[in-house]
Amino acid sequence: MAEPAAAEAPPPDTGGAAQGPTLMDRLNGLGRQTDIMLALGVFGIVLVLLIPLPTWLLDIFLALSITFSALILLVSLFIHRPLDFSPFPTVRFILPVIPLALDPRTTQFTTNLGHQT
């Protein structure tokens, strides 16, 4: 005996307005454009040099810098073939710039506010 086909629920009524891409769709599209992400990252590093940072944000950036460095070290130690980590030259070029950008802010914080902590 054949079973009746399950009826599909109708799509929700949008009131005739076309729905655009969601935020997650836009973020996924931005993640595929690595050149834009690299440019935004370099721009962020330059902003760190120009804009004074609160101490909590400086601490977070220093922790992220150490974490990224350890992650790159572990990835480079455990890959089997050199081509498994093909973005290594770009990462090796950009990653040391982050502590160099944070160093003047850390020095400024230490010399100006170090006696208060």
Image (cartoon, helix red, strand yellow):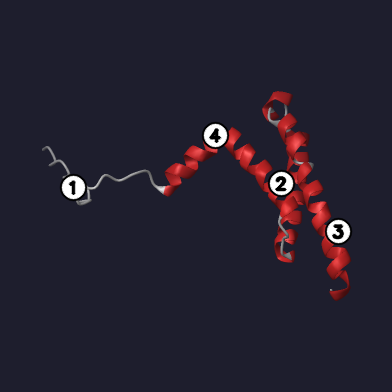
Q: Which residue is mark 2?
A: 46
- CA gap, disc 4 to disc 1? 35 Å
In terms of sequence position, does the residue under pointer 4 or pointer 3 come before the other? 4
Q: Position of residue 15 (x, y in %)?
A: 20, 52
In terms of sequence position, does the residue under pointer 4 or pointer 1 come before the other? 1
Q: Nearer the viewer, mark 4 or mark 1?
A: 4
In terms of sequence position, does the residue under pointer 3 or pointer 2 come before the other? 2
Callout 4 amino acid: Gln
- CA gap, disc 2 to disc 4? 21 Å
Left/right placement of residue 67 relative to residue 6 reads right
- The answer to whether residue 51 is seen in the rendering is yes
Secondary structure type for disc 1: loop
- CA gap, disc 4 to disc 3? 35 Å
Q: Residue at x 86, y 58 (%)?
A: 107
Q: Nearer the viewer, mark 2 or mark 1?
A: 2
Q: Position of residue 95 (x, y in %)?
A: 75, 41
In terms of sequence position, does the residue under pointer 2 or pointer 4 come before the other? 4
Q: Position of residue 8 (x, y in %)?
A: 19, 45
- CA gap, disc 3 to disc 1? 62 Å
Q: Residue at x 66, y 44 (%)?
A: 43
Callout 1 amino acid: Pro
Q: Which residue is mark 1?
A: 10
- CA gap, disc 2 to disc 1? 51 Å
Indicate the quadrant where residue 69 lies. top right
- The answer to whether residue 81 is seen in the rendering is no
Q: Nearer the viewer, mark 4 or mark 3?
A: 3
Residue ranking furthest to the bottom: 116
Q: Which residue is mark 4?
A: 33
Q: Is residue 13 above or below residue 54?
A: above
